[in-house]
């Protein structure tokens, strides 16, 4: 039997409880690591790193996407770990570049934050430096980690010599910061000499020896602890492009490079191929590196091709991290009476996103992740033997003179393949809240969460792509719902057992497909938003790829609601008949409304009418009428889902702990007060020669009492805060059932016919 | 009589067919009998000029856009005679004309106000014009014969002359036709002087000069043709003791002054020069240290060195970015514009700081692609969205040509037609847009395809063409905007360099060589054409070096002349015989007040200490100070949006506003500091004068100030005020008085 999977199309999710959506928070709280200070370290260094975050309690570990970076909690004077501080050790051979830092906390693994490993020494600058008089002195060949205050210009001074070349860059956008950096090199008096506001490198060659100044600010002078940056100042060689600080990868980069492509291009563009009649002669296939330089550069290549040949053209530039929009034009060249005529054969534009990308308005209208790219991927069909010209240009390049805007042009015979990337699904809501996009894979017990998986199909590959998620923590399962032939969207449903114990693992997702008779498997990149965005209109969500895929399960809280079929089995049904699935629910929090409207999505089942699962009901029989649904024989994975508004309580266990801590602090304070009172009284009674001693003891006791009172006040404050947080609040989220597998068998006569056909006639 | 029915042109005039059936009505036309010898009139040559002269087809009357007046529509100034003919003769079932009784034509009854006419009496019964129209109607409203000659030009006599003050000169206008024939059209032509304070032109072509010396032009229009009568009005005073010239600017200005007999004032003193040039280049007052150092400097080239230092300073970039960002409409329309506006303003500022060649600066705006954060000039395309707006802004801002009129009709004062208009629009026809993650912000790219734009008049697509240039064949792959930028930067481009140097000239001299500064046209000639040409040539030869364009102006003796007029040149307001004092712009004045008082103005989202001239967009105009003093809202490409005239509100604001009072009383400000200082008062007064005027006080000023400071002060109850408080009040008073002087409020 041909096995088929149905799939979820959660992107087209229903409008959840629209009328009350405005007042609700979106998504159940997830742990987020928001800042680290510093934001990187030198190879071989050991540094103390302070972290901040959201929904982080009981942080036990700071982990990195590369095992060559490790961390241990800072141990305080009292021998206990200091909250939110770690000693990070970077081995000498840790890879240079961006790594993801995450923490493990009460709710599990957090969202990532970029952490850079480099070769230069690093300093963290925390002193005020908002005027030229307060400029912080920095040395050449160093990285300064700092945080930008609001309405400020940070000033640094450094020595520079005539005849030397310095590269100055402020890394911010590529390391998850909210800062849009402006970097200015000024003279010793602070008079501006060179400016960069577009995230590039300042190439500085001073006219004279002396002290110079670097000024850094945000483009619109925003500032906060989330506006962090790394200022790189280094002396560089006289030739070539200055080195760049590494950057996180855009989501579009998931489709680059194609499998098997060598790291370096086989050949290089050769100018003056920007003059049409001096086109660079090439033979196909080809793999050429070039750059969109100077402004309005058009690189032309000329080749011969035969009738009926089909060539696939792929250009990467934006996916390599450049702000470019490549375009390819292929033209046939005919020559008559010595005059050449060009006839358009193909115009190749962007790699389209398979899903509509969000407009980031108040209403949610699609994911803000774009696996598509302004880069080029398309085919050229040759209709007749002849000479052809291929032009590559940057549609953004008319006036921009950036030698660093490189591209790679690959022209090949058809090599069907695919690339995939995944992210957390969101729901149709109208309050601009996009926080759910940055949620880490931190499951509660009994939880179910869904990833959307998108494919970029290469060179006409149209077959099924099976999805699989492996290396999960104990008590966690994942079901990959395939990307069907001809489509580009699939899903993975990840569920945690209700009785799972806390665990954590680095998981992986792969897609497998049969291409030209062979099974190929490709890794899936995971994407996230850099920040939990509360209002997409005010703050544009910034998506990026992450470097690892950690999954955790926590028993600190259970999922407010779990749905699952009454029996864990493969449900069988005959084509055209009815199948009733008793769907069970476990309610762990109060929900608003009277029912949860649920749908079944997936090939063969997407026409099932929505049904209402009554609130607090333990079970509901879902009837699948295959005659109506016209589901063909095959094997399907199906999930039900809907949206619900829970009266969610954040960390109620924390209230009990805080209450106990307060009680303890109160009793310690009372004891300290009693002791101080007693010792103070003893001072008057003390013999003259013991008076000083008694006074010292009384003073010490009074100090201790003050500390105990402060601790008591702190405990009270903490209890008030956690009590407030634990008060029930409306939170809306997607509620997903455990996947259900259904086998649809052919009708008896069909089966007999099939058997008859298969049986050789005597 | 002409045989209407056998006329070759009869088919053009349907109303003529009515004649046979209403022949009895011919009795109603007794006044005019046409003989066969009467030459048949030509609608274009004979009728339209009468309508134009009578203002029937002015924009306010029947040529009002799209609607005309009470259902009767004419083309503006008769630029579309075919349409006018249709409207007069055929529209409204032909009821406007009555060939059998021409004088009973509604067309004439209205024009003569015989029947009530909203426009009143535009045509005297019995006048020559009236008779012509009657005759034309009587002839059966002939349009024109294909063989009729075309009007090729109009000729003026005289076309250029020197006139005395309060003199008169009658012009003669001759129309020239393609067959070589001529016609005196003096009575039918229209006349308009470009500076009515200097000369007026009467309806019949009589030009009268006033008592102001200088150059004035009278535009003469007839039937779509324009010509100019250029008049030089000398003062006739002896021009002696001219300062030694610094460069060609002086040579050409002084040559003109000699020609018109206007002696220049002497070169200004050092203090005045330093204050003037610092305000004009850096938009700020010189510091006390700068003023003192300049006074003490004995080098002969110190003026040139201070010019170079100012041009190299970021203050220059800030000040001129303020000018350009406003003209480029860097306007805050919603909160979310902040990033785009800050980015674009900064880009302008950084370009000026780096002294990016002007042609490159304009090129990067016109042909911007990508997103705003990555390529800030893309922001221009956020504000200016449609090709029509784009071409109009580009034409006015970078070419000094106002094309708005030509969208709907032929330009009334210019040679530009709708074809020219849409040819310019075609450069912007391939601007592709894609939405970005930021609402309302598109990314811009070149959309492959044939660059062309549909002429709304002809409904035919037109190819891109620079003004007055040939149509360009732009390959589908090539961004036509780059070709527009190429065309602009051509050495032979008659507009691009001129409008910039004229704009900058006006910045420094208050008055452009052409006024308005962005209205360069044949009919609005410069007051000193040789100078404008030379400045433009110099600018082109310097590879569009903006700092050099400024340097050549401010290093001239002309710029450095005293603002104090001599006995002859006070009347001169266009020949630069002395410096014309200018009110400080709103932003400059606010910075100057802060500088004088030691206060700091806090601007939202900007670091403390940000100068008002460095504000990125118009959102800061919520400041009462900036609003009252006329900071523009960046809604147009015209510098005229900045209000530079004085008002009562301005005076009151400086004298009484809590804002200014607060600045005077700033803790740690100048008054506070000086009051607490142990220095002698004379030294402190010296500091104040240096800060405000870049000069020390005169003996008289010093003694007045000293005595004011030492007057015993009492409160409202008559009780003496504590000495420390009294001293602070005294210094606040002194600063207040100085701030309200013309010497402080003006650049002079």
Image (spheres, coloured by chain):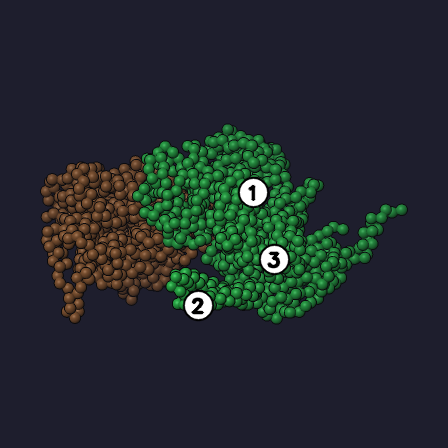
Chain colours: A green, B brown
Residue A721 marker: none
Provide residue B659's location: percent of width, then percent of height: 27, 61
Q: Please report whichever mark, 1 or 3, sits nearer to the chain's N-terminal start.
A: 1
Is residue B174 in sight in this rendering? no
Q: Earlier in the sequence, mark 1 or mark 2?
A: 1
Q: Chain of mark 2?
A: A
Position in image of residue A330 (x %, y %): 54, 38
Residue identifier under label 3? A554
**Quadrant occupied by the N terminus of chain B:** bottom left
Q: Position of residue A753 (x, y in %)?
A: 82, 53
Q: So how many labels did they put on this image?
A: 3
Subunit ID for the residue under disc 1: A
Question: Quick check: B168 left or right of A643?
Answer: left
Asked if residue B258 lies left or right of residue A110, the reply is: left
Direction top: furthest residue:
A338
Is tag 2's residue or tag 3's residue first in the polypeptide sequence? 3
């Amino acid at each position: 039997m041909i096995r088929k999977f149905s799939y979820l199309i959660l992107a087209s999710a229903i409008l959840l409880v629209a009328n009350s959506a405005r007042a609700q928070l979106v998504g159940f709280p997830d742990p987020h690591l928001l800042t680290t200070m510093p934001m990187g370290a030198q190879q071989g260094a050991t540094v103390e790193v302070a972290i901040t975050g959201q929904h982080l309690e009981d942080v036990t570990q700071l982990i990195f996407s590369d095992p060559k970076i490790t961390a241990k909690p800072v141990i305080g004077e009292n021998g206990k770990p200091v909250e939110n501080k770690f000693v990070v050790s970077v081995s000498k051979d840790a890879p240079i570049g961006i790594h993801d830092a995450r923490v493990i906390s009460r709710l599990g693994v957090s969202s990532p934050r970029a952490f850079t490993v480099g070769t230069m020494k690093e300093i963290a600058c925390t002193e005020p430096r908002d005027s030229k008089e307060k400029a912080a002195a920095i040395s050449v060949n160093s990285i300064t980690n700092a945080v930008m205050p609001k309405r400020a210009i940070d000033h640094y001074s450094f020595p520079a010599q005539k005849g030397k070349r310095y590269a100055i860059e402020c890394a911010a956008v590529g390391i998850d910061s909210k800062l849009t950096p402006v970097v200015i090199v000024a003279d010793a008096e602070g008079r501006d000499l060179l400016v960069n506001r577009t995230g590039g490198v300042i190439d500085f060659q001073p006219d004279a020896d002396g002290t110079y100044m670097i000024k850094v600010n945000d483009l619109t002078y925003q500032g906060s602890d989330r506006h962090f940056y790394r200022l790189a100042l280094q002396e560089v060689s006289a030739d070539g492009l200055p080195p760049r600080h590494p950057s996180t990868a855009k989501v579009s980069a998931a489709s680059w490079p194609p499998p098997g492509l060598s790291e370096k291009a086989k050949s290089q563009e050769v100018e003056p191929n920007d003059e049409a009649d001096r086109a660079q002669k090439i033979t196909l296939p080809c793999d050429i590196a070039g750059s969109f330089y100077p402004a309005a550069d058009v690189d032309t290549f000329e080749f011969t091709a035969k009738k009926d040949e089909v060539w696939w053209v792929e250009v990467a530039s934006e996916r390599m991290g450049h702000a470019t929009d490549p375009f390819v034009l292929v033209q046939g060249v005919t020559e008559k009476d010595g005059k050449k005529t060009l006839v358009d054969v193909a115009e190749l534009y962007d790699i389209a996103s398979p899903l509509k990308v969000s407009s980031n308005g108040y209403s949610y209208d699609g994911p803000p992740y774009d696996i598509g790219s302004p880069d080029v991927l398309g085919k050229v069909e040759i209709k007749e033997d002849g000479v052809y010209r291929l032009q590559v240009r940057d549609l953004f390049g008319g006036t921009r003179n950036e030698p660093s805007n490189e591209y790679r042009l690959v022209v090949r015979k058809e090599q069907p393949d695919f690339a995939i990337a995944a992210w957390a699904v969101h729901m149709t809501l109208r309050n601009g809240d996009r926080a759910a996009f940055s949620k880490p894979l931190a499951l509660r017990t009994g939880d179910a969460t869904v990833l959307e998986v998108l494919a970029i199909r290469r060179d006409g590959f149209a077959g099924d792509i099976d999805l699989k998620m492996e290396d999960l923590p104990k008590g966690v399962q994942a079901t990959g719902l395939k990307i069907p032939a001809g489509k580009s969207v699939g899903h993975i449903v990840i569920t945690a057992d209700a009785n799972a114990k806390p665990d954590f693992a680095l998981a992986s997702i792969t897609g497998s497909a049969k291409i030209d008779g062979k099974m190929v498997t490709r890794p899936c990149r995971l994407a996230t938003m850099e920040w939990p965005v509360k209002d997409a209109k005010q703050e544009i969500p910034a998506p990026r790829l992450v470097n690892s895929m950690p999954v955790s399960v926590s028993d600190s809280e259970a999922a407010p609601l779990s749905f699952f079929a009454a029996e864990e089995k493969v449900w069988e049904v005959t084509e055209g008949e009815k199948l009733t699935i008793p769907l069970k629910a476990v309610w762990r929090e109060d929900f608003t409304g009277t029912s949860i409207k649920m749908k079944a999505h997936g090939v063969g089942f997407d026409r099932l009418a929505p049904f209402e699962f009554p609130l607090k009901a333990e079970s509901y029989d879902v009837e699948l009428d295959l005659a109506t649904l016209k589901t063909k024989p095959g094997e399907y994975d199906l999930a039900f889902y809907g949206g619900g508004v829970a009266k969610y309580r954040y960390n109620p266990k924390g209230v009990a702990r805080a209450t106990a801590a307060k009680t303890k602090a109160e009793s310690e304070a009372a004891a300290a007060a009693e002791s101080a009172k007693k010792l103070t009284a003893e001072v008057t009674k003390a013999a003259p020669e013991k008076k000083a001693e008694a006074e010292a003891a009384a003073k010490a006791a009074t100090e201790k009492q003050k500390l105990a009172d402060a601790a008591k006040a702190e405990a009270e404050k903490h209890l008030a805060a956690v009590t407030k947080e634990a008060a029930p609040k409306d939170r809306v989220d997607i509620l997903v059932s455990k996947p259900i597998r259904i086998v649809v068998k052919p009708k008896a006569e069909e089966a007999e016919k099939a058997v008859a056909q298969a049986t050789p006639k005597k | 009589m002409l045989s209407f029915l056998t006329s070759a042109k009869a088919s053009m005039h349907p109303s003529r067919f009515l004649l046979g059936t209403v022949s009895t009505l011919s009795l109603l036309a007794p006044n005019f009998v046409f003989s066969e010898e009467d030459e048949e009139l030509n609608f274009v040559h004979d009728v339209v000029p009468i309508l134009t002269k009578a203002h029937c087809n002015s924009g306010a009357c029947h040529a009002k856009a799209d609607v005309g007046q009470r259902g009767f529509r004419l083309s503006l100034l008769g630029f579309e005679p075919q349409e006018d003919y249709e409207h007069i003769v055929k529209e409204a079932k032909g009821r406007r004309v009555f060939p059998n009784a021409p004088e009973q034509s509604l067309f004439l009854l209205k024009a003569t106000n015989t029947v009530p006419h909203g426009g009143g009496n535009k045509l005297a019964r019995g006048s020559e014009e009236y008779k012509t129209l009657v005759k034309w109607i009587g002839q059966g409203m002939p349009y024109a014969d294909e063989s009729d000659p075309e009007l090729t030009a109009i000729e003026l006599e005289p076309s250029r002359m020197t006139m005395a003050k309060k003199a008169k000169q009658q012009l003669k206008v001759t129309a020239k036709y393609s067959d070589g024939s001529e016609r005196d059209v003096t009575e039918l032509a229209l006349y308009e002087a470009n500076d009515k304070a200097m000369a007026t032109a009467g309806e019949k072509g009589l030009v009268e000069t006033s008592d102001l010396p200088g150059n004035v032009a009278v535009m003469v229009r007839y039937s779509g043709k324009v010509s100019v009568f250029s008049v030089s009005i000398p003062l006739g005073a002896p021009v002696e003791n001219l300062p030694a010239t610094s460069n060609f600017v002086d040579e050409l200005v002084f040559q003109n002054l000699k020609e018109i007999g206007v002696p220049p004032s002497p070169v200004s003193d050092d203090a005045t020069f330093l204050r003037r040039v610092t305000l004009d280049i850096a938009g700020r007052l010189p510091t006390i240290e700068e003023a003192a150092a300049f006074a003490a400097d004995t080098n002969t080239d110190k003026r040139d060195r201070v010019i170079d230092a100012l041009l190299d300073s970021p203050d220059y970039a800030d000040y001129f970015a303020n000018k350009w960002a406003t003209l480029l409409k860097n306007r805050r329309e919603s909160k979310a514009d902040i990033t785009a506006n800050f980015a674009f303003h900064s880009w302008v500022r950084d370009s000026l700081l780096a002294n990016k060649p002007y042609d490159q600066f304009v090129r990067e705006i016109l042909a911007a692609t990508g997103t705003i954060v990555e390529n800030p000039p893309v922001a221009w395309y956020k504000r200016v969205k449609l090709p029509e707006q784009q071409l109009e802004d580009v034409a006015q801002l970078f070419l000094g040509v106002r094309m708005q009129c030509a969208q709907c009709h032929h330009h009334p004062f210019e040679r530009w037609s709708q074809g020219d208009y849409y040819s310019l629009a075609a450069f912007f026809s391939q601007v592709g847009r894609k939405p970005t993650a930021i609402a309302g912000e598109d990314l811009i790219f070149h959309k492959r395809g044939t660059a062309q734009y549909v002429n709304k008049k002809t409904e035919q697509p037109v190819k891109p063409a620079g003004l007055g240039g040939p149509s360009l064949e732009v390959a589908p792959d090539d961004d036509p905007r780059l070709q527009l930028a190429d065309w602009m930067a051509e050495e032979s481009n008659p507009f691009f360099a001129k409008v910039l140097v004229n704009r900058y000239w006006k910045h420094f001299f208050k008055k452009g060589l052409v006024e308005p500064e962005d209205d360069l046209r044949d009919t609005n000639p410069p007051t000193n054409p040789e100078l404008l040409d030379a400045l433009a040539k110099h600018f082109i030869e310097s590879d569009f070096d903006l700092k050099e364009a400024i340097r050549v102006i401010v290093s001239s003796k002309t710029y450095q002349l005293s603002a104090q007029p001599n006995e002859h040149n006070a009347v001169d307001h266009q020949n630069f015989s002395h410096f014309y004092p200018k009110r400080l712009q709103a932003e400059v004045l606010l910075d100057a007040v802060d500088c004088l008082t030691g206060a700091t103005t806090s601007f939202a989202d900007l670091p403390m200490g940000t100068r008002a001239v460095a504000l990125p967009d118009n959102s800061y105009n919520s400041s009462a100070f900036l609003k009252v003093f006329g900071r523009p809202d960046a809604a147009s490409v015209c510098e005229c949006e900045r209000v530079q005239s004085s008002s009562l509100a301005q005076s009151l604001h400086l004298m009484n506003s809590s804002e200014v009072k607060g600045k005077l009383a700033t803790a740690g400000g100048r008054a506070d500091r000086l009051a607490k200082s142990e220095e002698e008062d004379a030294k402190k007064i010296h500091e104040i004068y240096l800060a405000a005027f870049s000069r020390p006080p005169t003996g008289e000023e010093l003694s007045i100030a000293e005595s004011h400071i030492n007057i015993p002060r009492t409160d409202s109850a008559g009780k003496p005020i504590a000495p420390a408080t009294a001293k602070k009040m005294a210094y606040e008073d002194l600063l207040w008085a100085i701030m309200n002087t013309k010497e402080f409020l003006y650049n002079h």
